Image (tube, rainbow, N blue to C red):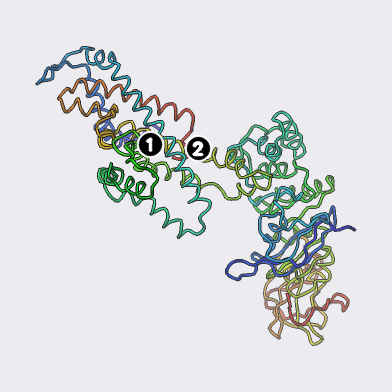
Amino acid sequence: MQADVELIRVTKRYGGGAVAVDDISLAIPAGSYCCLLGPSGCGKTTTLRMIAGHEEVSDGDVLIGSRNVTNLEPAVRGTAMMFQSYALFPHLSALENVAFGLRMRGVARAERLRRAQEFLDLVQLSAMAGRLPSQLSGGQQQRVALARALITHPKVLLLDEPLSALDPFLRTQMREELKRLQRELGITFIHVTHGQDEAMALSDIAVVMNGGRIAQAAHPREVFEKPASAFVARFIGGHNVLRLPEGRFAIRTDRCRLGGDRLAGHVTAIEYQGAAVRVVLAAQDGQTAEAMLPDALFHAAPVSPGAAVTLGWDAADAHPLPQADAA
Amino acid sequence: MRRSALFSWLQAAPLALVLAIFLVVPMAMIVVVSFFDYSAFSLIPDFVFTNYREAFGSAVTWRTFGKTLWYAGLVWAITFALGFWLAYYLAFIVRGEMTRMVLFVLCTVPFWTSNLIRMIAWVPFLGRNGLMNQALIGAGLIDQPLEFLLFSDFAVVLAFVHLYTLFMVVPIFNTMMRIDRRLLEAARDAGASFWQTLWVVILPLCKPGIGIGSIFVVVLVLGDFATVRLMSGGQSASVGLMISNQIGLMQYPAAAANAVGLLVMVLLLMAAILRAIDIRKEL
């Protein structure tokens, strides 16, 4: 597949010598949903802003649709950005906010308002056209921001933590909507998030970043099933990272069970989570591990904190990790 | 419910009292006195319209009001142009809180001395044999000293701008600092040029600050008499100066009638500014 957005050895250095993004290369196929994922300070937002053109690239090149855009203005790159906390113009109505990009391009008033109305329809907010941002809820503001970004028909939509300001219920709803829009429009979405569940739910490529480098870039299923490093396994969650006599392994907590002879220790905590029960275990050698047991299985043979138990898993479920953690 | 309403009234009472005693009562006094009669030595309580008839029946008064308005308009335009860009520079160009702070304090330096001294300081600079003329003659740019530099409308406006630009800078700077920087990025992302961003995003969001700064400058210029007297060398008049002269001649009722006229003009201008700009957002 042809790469739509390509980063070639991109580095971002700041004045004081601090390196925010360290020599990363990445190819994002056209029409895919890409999530940049990582803890705060990992360089994911800086990477996004360099693609958008709001941050200068210190070294390397940014290609969009095989055109080198490294030194181009944001507006001519074919990208549009949806900002964290939306950055809607507080003095303009929802409709005028959406029409802003067209206004800047000199589209006549009647025409731009008509097209803005179409995009408000697209995000199901036609009824709110006349309201100011302050009169809209967080979710509605976000839809306006989305419509504003889409109205210039970008090839790539860049989203900076678009869901972090929403409450959990709205977040799930908006997540579905983002995915639907991306499928329908067929354009590339690059979405920065620190939530691994968001990345798993949305992305075709999840790019896990740490310390300004890419720790792993792959389909989320591959990231989850074959984490490239202990960092990735820990960050993506649902894994035990254990040092065993044969080496270092990531073992999914839902593939662990009580019994067996691989790791001995005692229970330190039990959490009931509805469909599953989380059992935390302190091993004799000082490592901690946990098992996510189906509730029926747990309740068939319950254990309580303090009980001596062993942890087991199938050999095939132990995913070997590199010894030293490079990234 | 009743109790809390009473409590609210009580809370507002001290300020209302202060305003009543120090603002409403003196104003009312001026209005009352403006209808008094007077002789060379005394005020005669009465209700006559002669003061207004004399004041506004004379072309001199209208010219003076016009001139005052002209000063206010010109000074407003210059302080706005200067103040906006100074504030813009401080708010958007300067990086680092410390530098911004230092530059801001630098803007207030003229206010470390009194109005009068700041004005008098212009005299040796702008005078016929002042530094400016000597420098220009020395540089061979002119043969004759420039006469318009001092004791002229130029000097009056210059002094006003010097005195009042800061009153424009501060409120505009304040509103600019409250503009979310991401809005500027969002504008740029949507393809806005520098001037488009300025016109469509920054200027509308600065309106409350511009309104407050305009009120400061316009009111200060309209009420001024010392600057006009000193810098024009007595060759120009303003309403304030006219009132001051009448007080000097103990023509209090005449001064009061002019003061009421000035008050009406100020209130009309305020109404116009507040109509154009909603400053409540800033308060």
Q: Are marks 1 and 2 on the same chain?
A: yes
Q: Residues within 10 Å of mark 1 (few under 14, many from 20)?
A: many
Q: Which residue is mark 1?
A: B217
Q: Which residue is mark 2?
A: B207
Spatial CA distance of label 1 from label 2 is 15 Å
Is there a contact, CB below 8 Å, between mark 1 and mark 2?
Answer: no
Q: Residue A188 appears at what percent x and percent y?
A: 81, 52
Front position in the image: A104 or B60: B60
Report the side of B156 relative to A82 (left or right). left
B204 shown above or below B38:
below
Q: Amino acid at mark 2?
A: Lys
Q: Residue A44 appears at what percent x and percent y?
A: 70, 62
Mark 1, chain letter?
B
Q: Residue B158 appears at what percent x and percent y?
A: 36, 39
Q: Amino acid at mark 1?
A: Val
* Element carrying mark 1: helix
Question: Total number of numbered labels?
Answer: 2
In the picture, the quarter occupied by the N terminus of chain B is: top left
Which quarter of the figure has residue A309? bottom right
* Element carrying mark 2: helix
Mark 2, chain letter?
B
The numbered mark, 1 or 2, whose residue comes first in the sequence reads: 2
In the picture, the quarter occupied by the C terminus of chain B is: top left
The nearer-to-camera label among 1 and 2 is: 1
